[in-house]
Image (spheres, grey):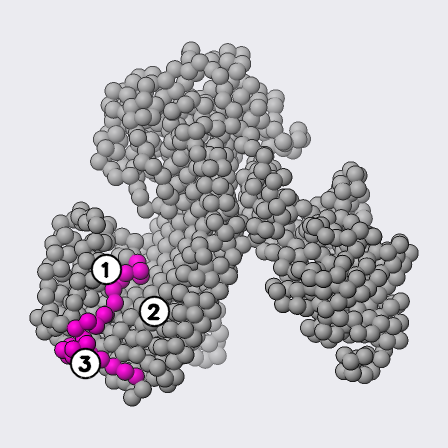
Amino acid sequence: MSEQSPSAAHDFIGKEYAAGFVTDVEQETIPPGLDEAVITEISRRKNEPDWLLEWRLQAYQRWLDMPEPTWAKVDYEPIDYQAISYFAAPTGDKPKSLDEVDPELLRTYEKLGIPLHEQEVLAGVERDPNTPRVAVDAIFDSVSLTTTFKEELQEHGVIYCSFGEAVENHPELVQKYLGTVVPPSDNFYAALNSAVFSDGSFVYVPKGVRCPMELLSYFRINAQNTGQFERTLIIADEGSYASYLEGCTAPMRDENQLHAAVVELVALEDASIKYSTVQNWYPGDEEGKGGIYNFVTKRGLCRGARSHISWTQVETGSAITWKYPSVILRGDNSVGEFYSVAITNNHQQADTGSKMTHIGRNTSSTIISKGISAGNSSNAYRGRVRMNPGAKQARNFTQCDSLLIGSKCAAHTFPTIESQRSDAIVEHEATTSKVSEDQLFLCRQRGIDAEKAVAMIVNGFCKEVLRELPMEFAVEASKLLEVSLEGAVG
Amino acid sequence: MKLLELRGLAASVDEKQILNGIDLTVNAGEVHAIMGPNGSGKSTLSNILGGRDGYTVTEGEIELMGAPVNGMSVEERALTGLFLGFQHPIEIPGVTNMEFLKVAIDSHRISLGEEEMNTRDFMVQVRDISKRLELSTEFLKRFVNVGFSGGEKKRNEILQLMLLQPRLAFLDETDSGLDVDALQVVARGINEFRSDENGVVLVTHYQRLLNYVNVDFVHIMINGTIVKSGDAQLAHEVETHGYTGLGEA
Amino acid sequence: MAVPQPANTLQGDLLKRVLAHEVQETPWLDRSASKSLLNCNGFPFPWKGRWQYSDFRALVEDALSLEGAHNALQSSHDVDVRRFDQPETEAQTMEFGSSDGVGDFPLIDINGVLFRSGTKLSSIAKTGSVKVNDANGSVDRHLMSIEQDAGMTVEETFKTGNRVVLCHVRDNAKLEYELTMPHGEGIGYHCLVVWLAKGSTFELHLASKGAQVRRNDVIVNVLGENATATLSGGWFVDGSDHLDSQVYMNHRVGGSHSEQSFHGVVDDRARSVFSGFIHIDRNASATEAHLTNRNIALSTQARAHAQPELEIYTDDVICSHGATTGHLDDDSLFLLRSRGIGEESARAMLTKGFLRQVVHSEGGTSLLNL
């Protein structure tokens, strides 16, 4: 495709990472470095109870003994964990209302199209009485700035707040569930997160309640030399439902920044959690300089019978992505789903996929993964489907498709099927191909320019996944796909 | 008004010479048929007009709407008014027919300095054309050509033709693989489309489409060159006697 | 050359024992190439990835313990054969290949250090044929070359022991390989490496039962344009047997084509593993590669693992893989039973039908009783 349309290539370059600005706000940070004193200081600043500090310190001890994982198909210079600052927050006391929030910060969210006033709606979404409303938890570096619609949610018994507030106001829930899905010793990055995690979101939906609005957490890295280590815990009690969305951006900086989050989902009997991510961390420049290292552990536990956990992710950002949103299907008849679009361009590297562990009877899981690689990037799907001996009549279907744009990119598919049940059915299918010349020719012959044609074909390729996104996010995701492929055609 | 003029056109595909000097002029208001056996270069001609990669003009010239096409991209040629009907319409999974048609018509309008078509007008027009082609509106929601029967694919081509209203329609074997009913629907579409303002070139292997569409000129193409031209009568001769013997004519 | 020290001392000891091993009977063979590769690459660590399901140490210990040697080969007269265990003058400089350029396969070089018998042969005619019998619990090695425009049929039987077969298929040559692996009481490692030059063709017909532990590696390196590899095979693993089959399809140049289809049936408490790896190099444009692997478990305690992988470094490719694990199709079973066929026979019929789709060789058909 390289000789095909030189003009389109030039037109396409020049759009840039729109969220790449820096907010000029006074911050207090803990100086770079990691030891027990730093962890104690983080815990102290967050007024945490002793048990949590103890939990962090134990995780830290585990972390010291763990090797950094090397099995993923990603390549980067060793990270100096002592050069990272583990806490950054805007100075001053936590604002009690939006009026007390630094106007500079408010402008940041305005620019990003994230509504912090309850009467506003997400950018790009027309105000329509039928549009479900969205409650927002805005997390800026290590702290949560504000959470909207809290009172209204409370009326339904739904707790939606920052992780810090949850520790303060609902310690029994946090203590009961924290680390039950992703134990601190799970892996290197999970252990690190457990030791130093700052803020994140906490959701609890009580029995039988259908959460009346979408819950959006918007993560923003702003400070320099700082890592973001958020922790999110979502619990859906019996028969409840929650739809949670997550968005993330960061300024354009020349150095790499580490983001190592942990997300735990717990669905009890008949509960259902839908978790959607549009990941747009700064991917680095065209030469591969800068960008976020996104090393994230996300896992859901279908604890009760007939529970349902669904992950949908659109991964366009980050220099390196290392994440495998997974589901442990413990409850009988529980359902796990993973829908993913991962786009890599320039020098981005992604190693992402899912693990479905079937324990309960009649459990079923679906994995649909669409990888698009362009430029010099590398994009890998890695998955594991395991049917444990008790998973009577369990089922999995996996479909992984890769689309290649340009001859220097790479696409990999590494699925593993481990079946210990003769009555279980596991199906995996994968294809890899390039954007078809014939499709492009057809579109262009009908007058559609090459860049638009590719965007259309890529969008079509991802449709199965995009339609899983809540409407508010689908629009943004489609646009992001287009921007992410800039410079790829030509 | 000359819509298309080929002067001594020779062309190669992947360095293999396929077209060996073609002269052809299509004026507004005319319908031409190009007939020839398999491998005579008909599809190559279609691709070379469209500006497809890998197809190279080695000699001679192509003029579209009175201007040489040198250096024009595929979409630029399309926006000038060239429409290719494909012998094997390609599938685009995930892209709905509706979306595809809308983006295509908008690209044409934008190139003319017009506004994008508003969705309501677009729907009205598309529904109207679909109805005339006996296509259900359900079909608009399906992915481009995916899972379409042979007949549906060809009718979809005619739908695009009628929607985009090009100056010159170059239809490559639009009749192949159609049963008689579908053939009649397609022919009706072509007849509705044709006017004093535009021109049509039908590339076909058989004469049967010409039973439903009146043509002004028939050209016989063999081994990459037009060996004989005439009126509709010539098509009947081919039907009766075949292509043998015409090669030397 | 940096020598990575295996972190695990058990591995280190094992490696030392292999390197220290001298095969007394064949002093004329120069094994230094294999030794230096082993020394350089070490043993796999951790015992994961390719060695996740089969015990690497057990296979090496087994190879170290095997002492027999015998001539396992009969060939047609148009194939030139020389034996490694005979001190011919030229044999002293005989090359017998290594894992160099093949990738990280230490067992190829362990075999290179330990083998006691074997042959080097070449076919120059179109009609060459070779029969390779069971290694009978010995370590042996065979080096085959199918010369330009020549052809050869290999019929091999393998049960236990440690065997490496290295085949060079030169320009426009053709290799047809029937590999039949009956049930084995003991441990077996088999590795077939094939290099395909321009315009060459390789067909593999595999049929296998299990063994106490059996690992079967097939490595195909496509080095020339317009080469074609067609691999098919089936296995039936029962009792408490273990069969670990791994296929590595490496497309190093473009314009080549590979097709693979493998069906496996696992019964009783047996375990089957299939890993099918397709690698396409940056320069290998216009490559088409497909793989399917389907597995059926007949009993509740049977285990089937499947691990198909695609690793692709260029865009002009058409690739696919598919893998399934499941059980016999209930609808088909019902259909047969509704026509009066007893459940047992219906199951047998469907199982056979499932394997017949991929097993065509005479040896395979009779081994699997199809």
Q: Which residues are magenta?
A: C79-103
- What amino acid is found at the position of numbered circle 1 in the picture? Pro
Q: Which residue is mark 1?
A: C106
For image coordinates 29% across by 23% down, the residue present is: A33
Gap in angstroms between the C-alphas marked 2 and 1: 17 Å
Q: Is residue C370 visible?
A: no
Work out whether mark 3 precedes mark 2 in sequence or the reverse, and give the earlier one: 3
Residue C49 percent coordinates (x, y): 30, 54
What main secondary structure does the magenta stretch of the protein show?
A: loop
Which of A380/C87 is in front?
C87
Q: Which residue is mark 3?
A: C71
Give the answer, above or below, for where B106 lies relative to A282.
below
Q: Give the SS element for disc 1.
A: helix
Residue C58 percent coordinates (x, y): 17, 61
- What amino acid is found at the position of numbered circle 3 in the picture? Asn
Residue A137 percent coordinates (x, y): 49, 25
Q: Which residue is mark 2?
A: C194
Which residue of the protein is positioned furthest toward the front in this rendering? B59
Work out whether mark 3 precedes mark 1 in sequence or the reverse, and give the earlier one: 3
- Of all chains, the one bearing label 1 is C
Residues at marks 3 and 1 on the same chain = yes
Work out whether mark 2 precedes mark 1 in sequence or the reverse, and give the earlier one: 1
Which of A85/A96 is in front?
A85
Crowd rating for badge 2 (residues with CA inside 10 Å; few <14, some 14–19, many 20+): many
Q: Give the SS element for disc 2.
A: strand
- What amino acid is found at the position of numbered circle 2 in the picture? Val
Crowd rating for badge 3 (residues with CA inside 10 Å; few <14, some 14–19, many 20+): some
- Of all chains, the one bearing label 2 is C
Gap in angstroms between the C-alphas marked 3 and 2: 22 Å
Give the answer, above or below, for where B182 lies relative to B244.
above
For image coordinates 45% across by 41% down, the residue present is: A347
Q: Is residue A38 magenta?
A: no
